[in-house]
């Protein structure tokens, strides 16, 4: 089995942009649930990549590629939460491996790299969303330690089909002295179910 190297990008060459586009295009063409209705153009992916890499340089994202035999075969990223109360957490997004590279463990490699990177950077929680019928991805995320924390039925639209939007999270570690009110039974900070009113 060929070896894969993780490479973290702050800038992207034309060749890297072409290889990243190939991954995204071919994953979408094969029916991958990665946020596009149809395979995107190279210009669209290049524009998206510019935005992501700007966030990387600002410390608000990390973008990783898995390189096999000198070519990018998988990608993924995390982005920091946007408002003050969410700046301690990251959302993992766009995890994908080229269809020709399936079976090499690149999805796991990318995910573990992103989790370790976010933990090292001091973030407390990693979260992600996944389409409800993407059972392989859900099993992968669970094997890494992610747990489901919510599900919005029929919230993802693909043509005339609707799929559940499943949210998962992984605690990365909290600073000493952090009060975890959301973990308490009842009382301040907990989230008890409200009784329905008629």
Image (spheres, rainbow, N blue to C red):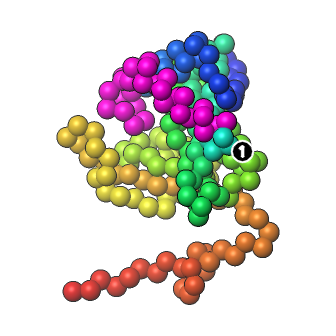
- The residue identified by callout 1 is 116
Residue 136's place in the image compared with 48, above or below, is below
The picture places residue 20, in percent across and down from the top left corner, at: 53, 21
Is any part of residue 103 visible from this angle? no
Residue 32: image quadrant is: top left
Q: Nearer the viewer, residue 41 or 134?
A: 41
Is any part of residue 42 visible from this angle? yes
The picture places residue 60, in percent across and down from the top left corner, at: 63, 44
Residue 188: image quadrant is: bottom right
The picture places residue 174, in percent across and down from the top left corner, at: 72, 64
Count of residue discs: 1
Name the residue: 69% across, 76% down. 179
Name the residue: 56% across, 35% down. 52
Q: Main secondary structure of the magenta part?
A: helix
Residue 152: image quadrant is: bottom left
Residue 109 belongs to the span the image colors magenta: no
Name the residue: 60% across, 25% down. 104
């Amino acid at each position: 089995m060929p070896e894969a190297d993780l490479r973290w990008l702050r800038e992207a060459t034309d060749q890297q942009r072409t290889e990243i586009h190939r991954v995204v295009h071919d994953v979408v063409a094969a029916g991958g649930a990665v946020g596009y209705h149809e395979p995107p153009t190279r210009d669209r992916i290049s524009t998206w990549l510019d935005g992501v890499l700007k966030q990387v340089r600002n410390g608000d994202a990390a973008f990783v590629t898995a390189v096999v035999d000198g070519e990018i075969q998988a990608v993924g990223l995390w982005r920091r939460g946007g408002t003050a109360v969410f700046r301690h957490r990251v959302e993992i997004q766009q995890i994908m491996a080229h269809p020709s590279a399936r079976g090499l463990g690149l999805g796991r490699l990318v995910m573990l790299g992103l989790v370790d990177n976010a933990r090292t950077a001091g973030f407390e929680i990693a979260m992600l969303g996944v389409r409800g019928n993407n059972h392989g991805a859900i099993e992968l995320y669970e094997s890494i330690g992610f747990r489901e924390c919510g599900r919005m039925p029929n919230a993802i639209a693909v043509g005339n089909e609707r799929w559940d939007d499943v949210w998962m999270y992984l605690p990365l570690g909290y600073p000493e002295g952090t009060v975890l009110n959301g973990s308490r039974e009842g009382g301040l900070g907990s989230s008890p179910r409200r009784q329905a009113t008629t």
